[in-house]
Amino acid sequence: MMKLLLPLLSFLLGHANTFVKEPTAAITQQVALHVRAITSILVSTVGSLALSCVGLSLFIASIAGQLDKNEEFHFTGGMGVYLALTVVSACVLAYSLRRETWMKALGFQTKPEPQRSEHKAGALENAVALLIMDFVEERQQRRHDEHPKADA
């Protein structure tokens, strides 16, 4: 049993390069990094899902326990802990399910969105601008043809 657990344990701790020869060490290290990142995201996703369910169920059970008694309702410290556990776990769950988190774990770089200008020129504006530029270039060409000595 230890023969099977030793390579797995050394892989998870980051010593996978001792089992692989030199030419493939870089590829193996990259794969190991990505597998570790994906594994940690999966563990945090499943763990936060479980903790948020447990925290919410304990919070509801605490409220139900107080409502079953014929006393006033009081927000207790235990309820605060259960509610905080639920909120923190839900935040971790939301972070681990984001697309950017998974893309980063898989090694893909997300490109920043280009800056958009306030005003986009329409097709008509582009056509008028091209017509004016054509007219200006034609006039410059005529001037150059009429007065060749002025440029020199």
Image: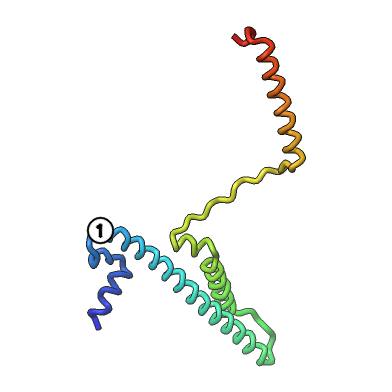
Q: Within 10 angstroms of label 1, few (less than 14), some, or many (20 or more) residues?
A: few
Based on the displayed image, in which of its 4 quarters is residue 147 positioned? top right
Q: Is residue 65 above or below residue 93?
A: below
Colour mapping used in the image: rainbow
- For label 1, the SS is loop
Q: Position of residue 56 (x, y in %)?
A: 58, 80
Picture residue at 67% right of the left edge, 43% below the top: 117
Residue position for label 1? 23
Mark 1 is on which residue type?
Pro
Nearest the camera: 97 or 131?
Answer: 131
Picture residue at 44% right of the left edge, 73% below the top: 43
Based on the displayed image, in which of its 4 quarters is residue 133 positioned? top right
* Residue at the limit of the structure toward the front, as seen here: 145
Nearest the camera: 124 or 98?
Answer: 124
Task: Tell me how many marks there are.
Answer: 1
Picture residue at 45% right of the left edge, 63% below the top: 105
Picture residue at 55% right of the left edge, 80% below the top: 53
Q: Is residue 119 above or below residue 74?
A: above
From the viewer's perspective, is 43 left or right of 6? Answer: right
Quadrant including the N terminus: bottom left
Q: Is residue 100 above or below residue 137?
A: below
Based on the displayed image, in which of its 4 quarters is residue 32 positioned? bottom left
Q: Position of residue 40 (x, y in %)?
A: 42, 69
From the viewer's perspective, is 28 left or right of 100? Answer: left
